[in-house]
Image (cartoon, grey):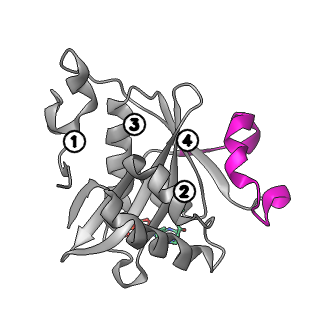
Amino acid sequence: MKIRKATLKDADGIVHLINVHAEKGQMLFRSREDVCTHIRDFLIAEKNGRIAGACGLNFGPGSLVEVRSLAVLPDYYRQGIGTALVNACIVQATLTDCERIFVLTYAMPLFEKLGFHIINMDQLPDKIWKDCQGCRKQDHCDETAMIRNLVQVAKPSGEAGQDPEQTSNPELCQGITESR
Ligand SMILES: CC(C)(COP(=O)(O)OP(=O)(O)OC[C@H]1O[C@@H](n2cnc3c(N)ncnc32)[C@H](O)[C@@H]1OP(=O)(O)O)[C@@H](O)C(=O)NCCC(=O)NCCS
């Protein structure tokens, strides 16, 4: 299994993955247009040439970042793919100098194992709720908010610090590759 950054060629696969789960009420629907607009913030888990899972990062406000639209194809559940994707998000967020990463989720045990802890939703900034507009559960959200602090890492000087392939901490970004 390989974790890599998404490209526009992955857009249909990502939309399918998200909307399969959205139909079951497990996450919010996302349009192809929305996915394409944010394609640089998506990571893909590829297995045998197939998109087995994906997730996105939603940056802002400030140094807070959200893990969004985490989904694994049911055929591949419980093989560590969700964990690998969230770990890769943690790497990306750390390299982008984010200080904290949060998620709204039903899969609390997965995030707990990765160092997230539960917080009251009121502690999250109002701005993040814009994505919830249109959700039928907007006024009675039953997801759990979880957050984790990120450790700041030493990076090489210049722009290279944003690139996981050029970080001075290869262990941290092990496993994420650029798609070409
Ligand atoms: C949640 C989801 C991404 C997990 O993906 P996965 O690849 O099966 O996860 P992993 O194999 O890495 O699981 C690691 C651990 O997380 C926990 N876990 C996994 N799926 C879980 C779930 N649905 N509910 C609760 N805990 C879960 C388990 O403790 C698991 O360890 P175990 O298999 O040794 O018991 C996947 O079930 C999914 O796509 N679900 C529907 C969409 C969704 O809920 N996304 C999360 C939105 S934030």
Residue extent of the magenta highlight: 117-140
In the picture provided, is 73 more to the left or to the right than 48? right
Of the four image quadrants, the one with ligand 1 is bottom left
For marks 1 and 3, the one nearer the N-term is: 3
Pinpoint residue 142: horizontal percent, then vertical percent. 74, 62
Q: For numbered disc 3, what is the local secondary structure?
A: helix
Pinpoint residue 120: horizontal percent, then vertical percent. 72, 42
| C-alpha distance separating marks 3 and 2 | 20 Å
In the picture provided, is 165 more to the left or to the right than 30? left
| C-alpha distance separating marks 4 and 1 | 21 Å
For marks 4 and 3, the one nearer the N-term is: 3
| C-alpha distance separating marks 4 and 3 | 13 Å
Q: Which residue is mark 3?
A: 93
Q: Which residue is mark 2?
A: 34
Q: Residue 160 lies in what quarter of the image?
A: top left
Q: Which residue is mark 1?
A: 173
The residue under the point 76% across, 54% down is: 133
Q: In which quadrant of the rendered image does the C terminus lie? A: bottom left
